[in-house]
Amino acid sequence: MTAPLDWLAALGAGAIRVCRIVGSIVLFALSGLSHIVRPPFYGRLFGRAMMEIGYYSLPVVALTALFTGMVLALQSSTGLSRFSAETAMPTLVVLSITRELGPVLAGLMVAGRVGAAMAAEIGTMRVTDQIDALTTLSTAPMKYLVAPRLLAGIVALPLLVVVADILGVFGGFFVATAKLGFNPSTYIATTLSNMQTQDVVSGLVKAGVFGFLIALMGCYHGYNSRGGAQGVGAATTLAVVSASVLILAFDYFLSELFFVR
Amino acid sequence: MSGAVPKIRVRGLKKAFGDKIVLDGVDLDVMPGTSMVVIGGSGTGKSVLLKCILGLIEPDEGSIEIDGADLLHMDGKAQTAARARIGMLFQNGALFDSIPVWENVSFALLAQRRVARAGAREKAGEVLGQVGLSPSVGDLSPSELSGGMQKRVGLARAIAAQPEILFFDEPTTGLDPIMGAVIDGLIVDCVKKLGSTAVAITHDMASASRIGDRAAMLHRGKIIWSGPADKLLDSGNDVVDQFTHGRREGPIQMELRR
Ligand SMILES: Nc1ncnc2c1ncn2[C@@H]1O[C@H](COP(=O)(O)OP(=O)(O)O)[C@@H](O)[C@H]1O
Ligand SMILES: [Mg+2]
């Protein structure tokens, strides 16, 4: 008799929990963002975070983009040739890379590399009282730890995606000309004439959002980790998983926003 | 004590985590320029008490006054300013391991803009000297230091901004007896030199009698005894007696069995 009510109660409790978590993440994000614009500014920490997120991610993002562009050319030439539409291949490659694959793949790779490292570093600081120590030394942890990382995420990811776009298109070009017999100058001409500013810009905006999400998840889960090494491990996993899922979800909604009229 | 305002006055402080009551109405007075030692079993909430006073944990109920001003009812800025006057040595040191020792030591001074970055290193060397370390230690990373050195650096970091109030959370736990005595000596020296008011948590009776002017015992969320530190070993209170003499049988044991 009470079974349906139990079910309803469980559903309600779940919904409340989700709302509470989302609420606390939003408050955390707003607090972090507000510290970005209020002095004092920690330029050196921003620089360090930029190195960590941007510079050290370059190799992995570059390789990912290069191979993605290559495989994209290879696979699409098979598909397109069935409709005798091989000439559309440069366009397909450049649109896929700039609109979708550049930002999403760079985002996922950086989420794995940097999101985990951030959560582990901040989580360790939490469980060893270093975050409390910051407060007792007249320093706001949100400003010192979180704000520079959020800003670096927002700035560094678009820069990485510029590199990813170039290398992705180059990967496609390389396979098309070296293996599939495309004329290099025709390929480049087709690519340039079909690439629109909006494609690239929308990809870079996406990248900024993804960078923010990665840093936010790394900081949030690290900041709220509890209970020693195990807690830090759990925070690391949560940071990577939640950042990856959020990247894919936001990718859909941002695409809807940019391209569907 | 007639009429003097305590440096720290805690009244009816309560804190629960979930349904676990940790502090259940703590009253504590610490007079200016004196040292108070707080003893109590592991997990009785001694660290929570200090963290409530520092504003790192929000208490559920009660009042905390510093120099007669109610900390919990000040606006945010005044609270921050009041708490900037407290230095803290954390139980495990809590040194920042991403920056070198000298930057750890001068952290508060840099944050409060009381030294420029250029002069901070030299200033850190000076403070390291006060805790018996050579200035060259400043260039090491905290992870390269032994436990005793980490405690010293933590102490140096806590005293660098010359706080009016100093908290020590188990300063000698995990150190050998000689190093423990050395750290106690440094603490007493620093507190005396700065004229600070100090609150130290400890399990170590030798340490308690070296550091403290007065002592208090926290048990089951309340201060059940307080008195002169040299009375710790014959306090006349069953619980305190059992704790200070380390007896297996007694009122505390009874509760563990229950
Ligand atoms: N942030 C927290 N969240 C939940 N429980 C806590 C927290 N901090 C402390 N506790 C609990 O409060 C109790 C007292 O802890 P603590 O003050 O660290 O003890 P001690 O007297 O050994 O310093 C412990 O049981 C601990 O589990
Ligand atoms: Mg403790």
Image (cartoon, helix red, strand yellow):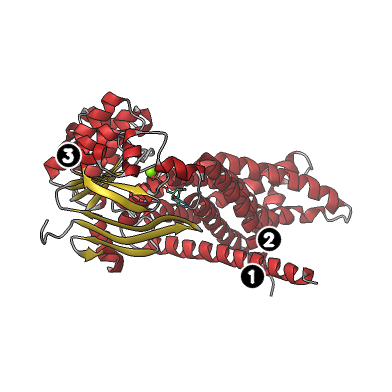
Q: Residue at x 31, y 36 (%)?
A: B244
Q: In this orientation, which residue lies closer to the viewer: A260 or B161? A: B161
Residue wearing tag 2? A194
**Quadrant in the rendering for residue B153:** top left
Which image quarter holds the N terminus of chain A?
bottom right
Q: Disc 2 versus disc 1: distance between alpha carbons?
A: 21 Å
Instruction: Kindly tell me whether residue B191 is visible in this rendering.
Output: yes
Residue wearing tag 3? B190
Horizontal relation, residue A119 to residue A31: left or right: right
| Chain ID, mark 2 | A
Element on which disc 1 rests:
helix
Q: Disc 2 versus disc 3: distance between alpha carbons?
A: 73 Å
Residue B9 x, y percent position in the rendering? 23, 59
Task: Tell me the kind of residue under disc 1.
Answer: Leu
Residue wearing tag 1? A257
Instruction: Kindly tell me whether residue A121 is visible in this rendering.
Output: no
Residue B217 x, y percent position in the rendering? 31, 46
